Image (spheres, rainbow, N blue to C red):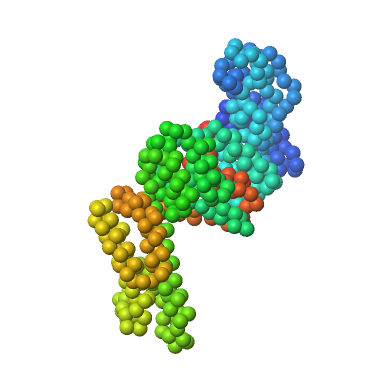
Amino acid sequence: MSNLKLLNKILRLTGMKITRFWFKKRNKEMHLAVKPYKNGCRCPECGRRGRIVRHATELRRWEDLTLMGMKILLWYAPKEIQCPTHGKVQETIPWALPYSRITYRLEWRICALCQIMTQKAAAKILKMATSTLSDLLHRIINRTRDSHKIRGVKTLGVDEISFCKGRKFATLVYDLDRSRVLWVGLGKGRGTIDRFFNECLSKGQKARILWASCDMSRAYTEAIKYHCPNATLIIDRFHVVKALNQAVDEVRKEEWRALDTGGRKAIKGLRWLLSMHSRNRTKGNTRFLNSLRNSNRRIHRAWVLKDEFEHFWNYSYRTSAERFLKNWMTAALRSRIPSLRKFVGTLRNHFDNIVTFIDRNLTNAVGEGLNRIVKIVKNRASGYRNLESFADMIYLTVGDFDIPAHIPSDLRTL
């Protein structure tokens, strides 16, 4: 076996043949003169073979992966061919895109590394400048997603995240069935979510959305009702429970302000007990809360109502759930506790979209899990200055389109 064939096997160079090699920069770079092997002189548009019109004399360079700390660079002079369909064109390059300066497998390695580490660390591994890697990465992501269209969405989730100081928010739209982020937009108002429905979904796609989950923001609920006529909207359970916990905690705060030092010591640590789910409390916790019936009836009453509300999520029949919720709302109004009466008003405003939880136990839990990954991506980079760069990393990590998978499988790794 010749040295060139052995080198080709070691480097696993697919679709090309090495004609010679040399080293530079004190053996830190390996330069390879290559040419297409058994698939050259093809049109980049239709893939048909063409007649060679001109042999190029100017060599082009492509950067490849690093091997054992040595950077590999490929050199080749593409030919101009005459395609029967498209006329004079430059022959297709099997190891890279027509106007790219890096190979397919370097593109794949950049995407794969940046999914699990910072761009600075990936640049160090690949022996290139961080700014160069960042430019290449975002170019790959934008090029891949330009031709991507959202398909097959039936269950939608909407939530917002903060991405920068100064209360800057972004709206995230999820496919809850596939646990993927569909779209990222600047802001959290009605205009932002309308932009998603108008720009990213067709009329038929909107009609095929059957389920949707979001918080109690009127901007999101009204937009979903307007754009998705066939969708059943379900208010996220987490946000309903959060609103109830805040109402109960407001009762605790009011009583705390009215008590003296001795009374405050008696109810110290009550905040976490009141927000705790009944299945997570010990018998001692329950006895302590029951003792408030004699010492502080308002807090005890708020806690009892909160515990009773937990039964709503266990109903299997919608009619029974509606009856229970109406009875609970009546009891909460009779308690004459202002914060609970305010919570009842919230339930009335979203009553129909809360009881739909009984039809399907759909929550934004998948969305919250994706939010956790998005926050990891943000913290890993110590924040982003603009939403465009942040959105690109979200699409790369948890997007609905697998960006590294667009690289041909036989050209991905060494």
Check the picture and name the quadrant holding the C terminus.
Answer: top right
Q: Is residue 332 left or right of residue 59?
A: left
* Place of residue 19 in the rendered image (x, y in percent of width and height, measured from the top left): 66, 26
- Give 130 or 254, whichever is nearer the viewer: 254
Does residue 2 show up?
A: no
Q: Residue at x 59, y 27 (%)?
A: 94
Q: Is residue 405 above or below residue 55?
A: below
Check the picture and name the quadrant holding the N terminus.
Answer: top right
Q: Is residue 12 left or right of residue 90?
A: left
Q: Specify the quadrant of the image occupied by residue 35.
A: top right
* Place of residue 215 in the rendered image (x, y in percent of width and height, measured from the top left): 44, 54
Q: Residue at x 43, y 78 (%)?
A: 255
- Give 297 or 58, whichever is nearer the viewer: 297
Does residue 262 show up?
A: yes
* Place of residue 331 in the rendered image (x, y in percent of width and height, measured from the top left): 30, 67
Most extreme residue toward the bottom, as rendered?
262
Q: Is residue 62 left or right of residue 216?
A: right
Q: Is residue 98 left or right of residue 236?
A: right
